[in-house]
Image (cartoon, rainbow, N blue to C red):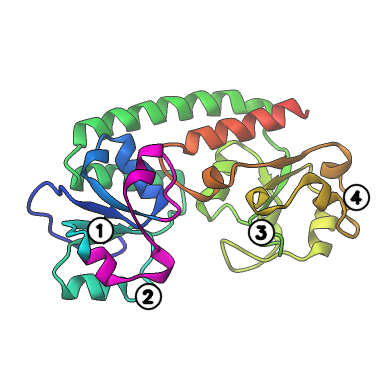
Amino acid sequence: LDSGPVTIEQRPERIVSLSASHTEMLYAIGAGEQVVGTDLTSNYPPAAQATAKIDAFQFSIEEVAALEPDLVILAFDFQGEGEALSALGIPFLVLGPPDSLFTAFSQLSLVGAVSDHRMETEQVLDDLYLQLDRIQRAAYRIRGRTFYHEVDETLYSATSASFIGDLYRTLGLVNIADTAGLDSPFPQLSPEFIIDQNPEFIFLADANFGVTVESVAARPGWDTLTAVTGGKVVALDGDLAGRWGPRTVELMDAILAAVEERL
């Protein structure tokens, strides 16, 4: 719990979620009717789009307070959100980006507890663990393949110390960013390093922002990469790749299928 201890004395009935990941969690565990506001990126499930919308990147305590929330869930506190909410006596949780599947599922369990949906959350988690077991069993066919995960076109990537990197690790794929020697779970790699590593697969988490297989191939020196010449550049769903929660197994299924189709 990134924000420290918080006391929720009764079931919250007016939840504001300023994180798309936690919005998805709330709806997945049956707490959707308690959600009265969500951030602008919360587009799933469709019901979330019908809630009041708040720009989490231009935080306004007045907008949040106007919804009379009895719980606010955030993924970040970099604009003084916690201090502003505390000043008005509004309970809140800051649940930052996890570093592993285990941490993400622990957040889901916590969201279930604070929203008073423990039983439904246990059922969701049981199903997620069953799906994860199925995926891991099938992943033996792709283990050992090397890859580069692109966060954005300035060549930021993600190591196995990040949530998204842990998904690849769980699938048995080998992350070239782990050998870059950079002290960050989201290092910026150089074009020379990527070309020298020559990954078998390239996964584009920035495809929603206009990066394409063709634009990757057009980068200087990239046209000779094994991933490019072999048709192994894969565009990911940016929402799935950028969130953690109940649809994480869908992303893992998509990665597994994409690799298998290209072997």
* Callouts 1 and 3 close, C-beta under 8 Å: no
Residue 193 locus on image (x, y percent): 80, 62
* Residue at the spot of label 4: 223
Disc 1 from disc 3: Cα separation: 29 Å
Q: Amino acid at mark 1?
A: Val
| Nearer-the-camera pick, 67 or 73 | 67
Tag 3's secondary structure? loop
- Looking at the image, residue 94 sits to the left or right of residue 227; the answer is left
For label 1, the crowd category at 10 Å Cα-Cα, with few meaning under 14, some 14 to 19 and many 20 or more, is many
Locate the N terminus by quadrant.
bottom left
Residue 120 locus on image (x, y percent): 24, 31
Q: 20 above or below 61? A: above
Q: Amino acid at mark 3?
A: Asp
Q: 204 above or below 188? A: above
Q: Amino acid at mark 2?
A: Gln
Mark number for residue 152?
3
Residue drawn at (43%, 67%) of the image? 57
